[in-house]
Amino acid sequence: MRRRPLAEPAPLEIKRPQVPWWVLLPWWAQLLLSPFALTWWALLILVKLLGLLARYPVMLVTPLAGWLLYRHFGTWPLLLGVLVLVNILALWAGLHWASFLRHGWYRLGSEWRRLTVYARQWRTVMRLSELAKETRGREYRPHLRRVRAEGWRDRVRVRMIPAQAPDAWEARRENLAHSFGASSCRVRVLRPRTIELDFVHRDPLNRPVEVPALEQDAEGLDLKRVTVGRTETGKPWRLRLLGSQLLVVGVPGAGKGSVLWSIVWQLAPAVRAGLVRLVGIDPKGGMELGQCPEIFDRIVFDNGPAAVELLEQIAAEVKERAARYRGVRRLWAKETGEPLTVLVVDELADVIAYQADKNLRERATRAVQTITSQGRAPGCVLVGLLQDPRKEIVSFRHLFNTRVALRLDEPQQVDMVLGDGVRQRGAAAHEISENTPGVVWVKEDGQREPVRARAFHVTDVNLTELREYATATDATVHEFPAPSSTEGGAAA
Ligand SMILES: Nc1ncnc2c1ncn2[C@@H]1O[C@H](COP(=O)(O)OP(=O)(O)OP(=O)(O)O)[C@@H](O)[C@H]1O
């Protein structure tokens, strides 16, 4: 009788050995193909070497030049060469620190960090974080492209593997940051299949940005590029006011006030010169705008009938100006002979959503919609501040073409404020620290990339200065040219 085995044999758990196809060719065919194969390999090695040279030019060329100098001329010329190089670099740094940092120090830093951090660990991190995939014996691994170190962050460009989406990287941001020794990691989509990872080491916006001195006249002010703070790359944060409608959203204490006062601060010379007219509504009883009411032409401190009437007057002004400009000009300019109207509504929701009187609420909503949808060309700008960006509160967010997200609670709120896909490009407003009020993510229509910036820190002392400035009597008033006969005729 046959005895049954005690246990089933385990399935064979080894990989089938794979041999290259050319091994199976007859020897004469291999001999015939060998010159082509050798040329191919030589070309491959050459391309690899050129690739290395392109990635590490400073780190390869400098020692190579030193070695050649030493071989041909000896030790002293080498030392002399090193001395000359050090002096040139010191002179460069002394004369133009910014360009030395950008093209010298950061260039070397990029190569160094690529070699010692990213290239060294790339394969392991990709495999362990399951961003590399294996199928039918072949491994697909995301490709490490350009690395740029900028001191506070490293920008690492990556080509994703087929069938991969940026979401996979979004979900592993923490893992990647820890693996590469950064404090956080942002994912930005550059184009199909190519993303850029920002490995942030420190926040360049962790210190408040001081307000500049008040300008005495409005000569240098460009209403399409009003500087209201500094971006994380160290450049001025410029907001487009002319031709814009602005929505500023943030949780309480996020620093909405600083965005608002930075705008007013920079507009003050134009207000004094009569080029800009500021109108304000502060439903919180003047807690915010009441700090410097003198700068406003008209101001209302509640969300009742007075606020609604003011909104309706501005909406009527929009329509009247639009009728006059029709066929004459496409956008407000100084030459129209009338000021740009900037309407600031602190806590917009109090006027259009929380007002208990349905009639007032609806009238306010209609007026705000008219201003935001038609106000751009006739020179009426709405700066609306908001805590809650939900659709039930403001259903016409799309009418604001510049959107500023301060600190928010949830990722969904970021999408509501900045629009779909902007968070995927790195604008993580829900991750702004409580310790950095005034830090924002801004998205302007027509600009692909969102910008991270910090508004000026406008203190109580600055606001006192602004009050004095607004009430000073020695201001130079801008002389508007007489409106052209066509515009005047249309108005009549
Ligand atoms: N840009 C900034 N730089 C430094 N500190 C700031 C900045 N903006 C605001 N702060 C500080 O953060 C705190 C809250 O700011 P602010 O009152 O402007 O917030 P808010 O969003 O307007 O709050 P709320 O909705 O309650 O009015 C204040 O103490 C202010 O000094």
Image (cartoon, grey):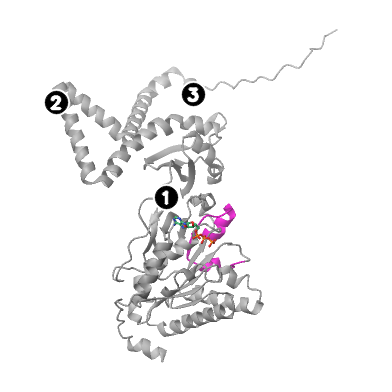
Q: Earlier in the sequence, mark 3 or mark 2?
A: 3
- Mark 1 Cβ inside 8 Å of ligand 1: no
Quick one: which residue is furthest to the right in this view? Answer: 1
Q: Is residue 218 above or below residue 125?
A: below
Q: Which residue is mark 1?
A: 205
Q: Residue at x 42, y 21 (%)?
A: 30
Give the extent of the magenta segment.
Answer: 393-418
188 is higher (above) or lower (below) than 215? above
Q: Name the side, left or right, on which 487 lies relative to 77.
A: right
**Quadrant containing the C terminus in the rendered view:** bottom left
Q: CA distance from mark 3 to mark 1?
A: 55 Å
**Mark in front: 3 vs 2:** 2
How would you rate the neighbour count of disc 2 (Cα within 10 Å): few for under 14, some for 14-19, many for 20 or more?
some
Q: Residues within 10 Å of mark 1 (few under 14, many from 20)?
A: some
Amino acid type at image mark 2 = Pro
Q: Amino acid at mark 3?
A: Pro
Instruction: Check disc 2 and report its element: helix, strand or loop.
Output: helix
Measured from the top left, where is residue 173 in percent x and y? Answer: 52, 41
Check disc 1 and give the amino acid type: Leu
Q: Position of residue 373 (x, y in %)?
A: 51, 73
The numbered disc on residue 20 is: 3
Q: Which residue is mark 2?
A: 77
The foreground one among 320 and 466 is 466
Disc ID at residue 280:
none
Q: Quadrant of residue 420?
A: bottom right
